[in-house]
Image (spheres, rainbow, N blue to C red):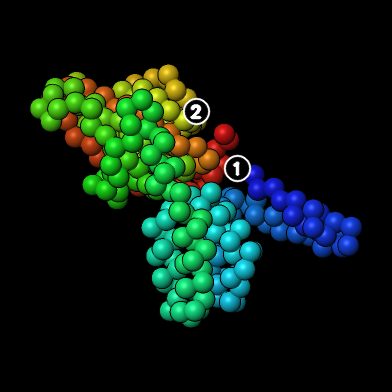
């Protein structure tokens, strides 16, 4: 995702074209787009922290709070970030930042409810949160004792699961059917595959892989756990942020 900014030229283009150039082309054109060196999410966290640390709680902070949300910083993460900053930057600055953050994240619940496709959003996938980067949601579509468990999994923008492997002595594996938004599927050693509604992915036993949403999109897919003997799931390391950020939408 490329950061583009025109605020400098829009506001100061005639008065100070050089400052507008430095703001739009250097700061937001070059520095913010050095994603291989530091992902956008971390840049947003650093920027918000620096502004609050300087006592800057004006429209520039509001802009960067909104950017942080767009770059994948969740509401719970932002609340923890501001709580942590309060002990270093001061309670009044934190209070002012919290008021802005509440407005930025106010429609998060309503936004989430509009996703999940035909099958609906489900509940926050807290049981598997340690194996996901970002917020996911889970809705079971079949009964607990059904031989073919089917779930609808929804990923917030930028959310993805860790690398993992499905194991089984016989049979097993998983099938994904994409139902909403845009996402990625990648097997180890292969390029990432772009996913859209209607796409079907067959995941064999023993293949290391991950799947999740694109950076700027919500994404939902059905998971079909194929019957097998002694089936298990091996969770591995998270998907590298820098590698994920280089994927082209």
Coordinates of residue 123 in the picture (x, y in percent): 28, 42
Image: 120 above or below 47: above
Image: 204 above or below 47: above
Is 75 or 110 nearer to us in this picture? Answer: 110
Q: Residue at x 55, y 65 (%)?
A: 48
Image: 249 above or below 69: above
Looking at the image, can residue 203 be seen? no
The picture quadrant where one finds residue 208 is top left
Contact? badges 2 and 1 (CB < 8 Å): no
Q: Residue at x 38, y 28 (%)?
A: 117
Estimate the spatial distance between the alpha carbons at disc 2 and disc 1, rounded to whole Å: 15 Å
Crowd around label 1: few <14 · some 14–19 · many ≥20 (10 Å): some
Q: Residue at x 46, y 79 (%)?
A: 91
Coordinates of residue 31 in the picture (x, y in percent): 68, 57
Which SS class for mark 2? strand
> Which numbered disc flags the more N-terminal residue, 2 or 1?
1
> Which quadrant does the N terminus fall into?
top right
Q: Residue 1's mark?
A: 1
Coordinates of residue 44 in the picture (x, y in percent): 55, 58
The residue identified by callout 2 is 194
């Amino acid at each position: 995702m490329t950061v583009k900014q025109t605020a400098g030229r829009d506001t100061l283009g005639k008065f100070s074209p050089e400052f507008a150039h430095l703001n739009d082309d250097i700061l937001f054109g070059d520095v913010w787009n050095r994603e291989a060196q530091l992902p956008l999410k971390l840049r947003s966290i650093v920027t918000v922290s620096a502004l609050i640390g300087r006592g800057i709680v004006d429209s520039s902070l509001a802009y960067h709070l909104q950017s942080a949300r767009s770059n994948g910083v969740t509401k719970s993460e932002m609340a923890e970030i501001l709580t942590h900053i309060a002990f270093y930057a001061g309670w009044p600055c934190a209070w002012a930042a919290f008021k802005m953050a509440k407005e930025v994240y106010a429609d998060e619940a309503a936004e989430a409810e509009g996703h999940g496709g035909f099958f609906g959003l489900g509940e926050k996938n807290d049981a598997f949160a340690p194996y996901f980067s970002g917020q996911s949601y889970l809705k079971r579509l079949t009964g607990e004792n059904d031989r073919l468990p089917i779930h609808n999994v929804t990923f917030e923008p930028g959310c993805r699961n860790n690398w993992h492997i499905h194991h089984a002595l016989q049979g097993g594996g998983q099938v994904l059917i994409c139902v909403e938004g845009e996402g990625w599927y990648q097997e180890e050693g292969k390029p990432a595959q772009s996913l859209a509604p209607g796409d079907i992915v067959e995941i064999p036993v023993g293949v290391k892989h991950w799947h999740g949403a694109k950076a700027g999109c919500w994404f939902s897919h059905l998971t079909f756990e194929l019957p097998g003997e002694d089936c298990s799931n091996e969770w591995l390391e998270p998907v590298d942020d820098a590698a994920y950020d280089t994927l082209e939408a």
